[in-house]
Image: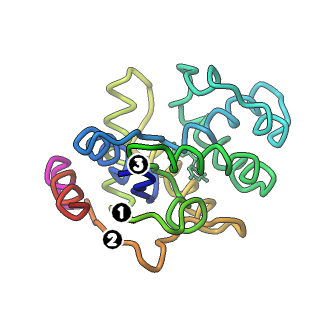
Amino acid sequence: TQGFTVAIDGPAASGKGTISRAVAEHFGFAHLDTGVLYRAVGAKVILGQDAESAAKTLVPEDLTNPDLRTPDVAQAASMAAAVPEVRAALVDFQRSFAARAGGAVLDGRDIGTVICPSAQVKLFVTATADVRARRRFQELSGNGLETSFEEVLADVQARDARDMGRADAPLKPAHDAIEVDTSDMAIEDAVAAAISLIK
Ligand code: C5P
């Protein structure tokens, strides 16, 4: 499995994170949630730092900041992610992670299209905006965050539009990606489908 890479892309709350973790565990591959890199940049922008310099000076501790999962950080991340210099600063780290011995799963928005165009397997995980907002709403409420379904849906839609509409590395399936629509699937079934596709 030297250099074996699984690229998993898709919009917010599509199920790609859960699928990626399960796939990595199943095959014994390392897993990188690349959204965390952009969230770490977003968190620094909220504290007043310039996005480009934040991306160029990220350190491992920035990736374990417990506040990275908030909706504010998600929006700041997607704004920073539209800046080409921010994306460029994060490429080498992601590519070296992908090339590690023993195999790797990377999930994000541009893994199959830009970061790892020659990944052995590419999945594009989708679900309707309504289903994704429902999942994210449950997750956020479960973590004790006060929010409404309407607010979460508006956030998800704003982020989708920004991620799909940007000029540099927009969210879209690679031409050779396999699409997995999880709208009507239990997450265990989506995981099982992804594992059998990879096998
Ligand atoms: O996946 P997650 O929701 O944590 O990503 C946060 C934001 O980071 C996304 O909305 C997107 O703008 C950006 N991102 C990106 N490219 C990636 C991963 C995330 O642009 N590979």
Q: Which of 177/48 is in front?
A: 177
Q: Position of residue 53 (x, y in %)?
A: 85, 37
Q: Which residues are magenta?
A: 184-190
Q: Residue at x 58, y 21 (%)?
A: 65
Q: Which mark is residue 179?
A: 2
Which residue is found at the position 44% from the left and 32% from the top? 147
Q: Mark 3 falls on what kind of element?
A: strand
Quarter of the image for the C terminus: give it: bottom left
Left or right of 160 in this view: 22: left
Give the vertical position of 107 relative to 167 (above or below): above
Number of marks present in the image shown: 3
Q: Is residue 186 above or below residue 146?
A: below
What amino acid is labelled 1 in the image? Thr
Percent across and percent down for residue 142 are 32, 26
Q: Nearer the viewer, residue 25 or 182?
A: 25
Say if the magenta span includes residue 103. Answer: no
Q: Is residue 68 above or below residue 118?
A: above
Q: Residue at the location (26% across, 61% down)?
A: 198
Name the disc covering residue 126, or none. Answer: 1
Identity, as a three-letter code, of the amino acid under mark 2? Glu
Identify whether 189 is placed above or below 126.
Answer: above
